Image: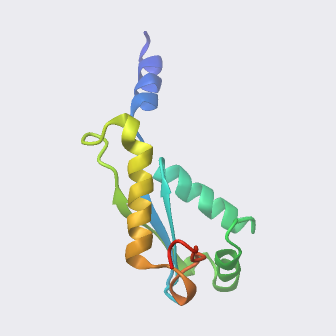
Amino acid sequence: MDKRKELKLAYKQTPRPMGVYQIKNQVNGKVFICGSMNLPAFFNSQRFQLNLKSHRNKELQADWDLYGADAFTFDILETVNTEKVAQDDWRKTVSTLEEKWLNDLQPYGDKGYHKQSALAK
């Protein structure tokens, strides 16, 4: 196998950073929390959607349009240690961490961009 193929294979086999992140509005303190199996790609996707005015969260999109990109930070809250968690459990672990952060930060109403479900009340 040539060096280029080896590098490509190694890249594909390397797990991407996964976990939970927040998009925080520095003007009003509101946060949007989400989990992802590939944090760098998800950050890029979120920025792209917001810049194209096509983000699924309309309230976040409205604030992005009002305050501009410089008013927001993208922060990793917690990552999955892929060496300590079995690969089959990565997705479940990300989901569990996301629930934990939603419960801890309660990003509803004036604190965030999430709608509070009937179960979370």
Residue 3 location, x and y as percent? 41, 17
Q: Residue at x 53, y 71 (%)?
A: 119
Q: Is residue 81 above or below residue 62?
A: above
Q: Residue at x 40, y 26 (%)?
A: 10
101 lies left or right of 84? right
86 lies left or right of 55? left
> Which residue is nearer to you in this view: 91 or 121?
121
| Furthest-left residue in this view | 84
Q: Is residue 47 above or below residue 5?
A: below
54 lies left or right of 3? right
| Furthest-right residue in this view | 53
Q: Residue at x 65, y 82 (%)?
A: 63
Residue 67 location, x and y as percent? 63, 85
* Quarter residue 15 falls in: top left
Residue 17 visible: no
Residue 52 location, x and y as percent? 74, 64
Check the picture and name the quadrant holding the N terminus: top left
* Quarter residue 115 falls in: bottom right
Residue 85 visible: yes
Residue 38 location, x and y as percent? 48, 48
Q: Is residue 110 above or below residue 17?
A: below
> Which residue is nearer to you in this view: 59 or 120?
120
> Which residue is nearer to you in this view: 73 or 78?
78
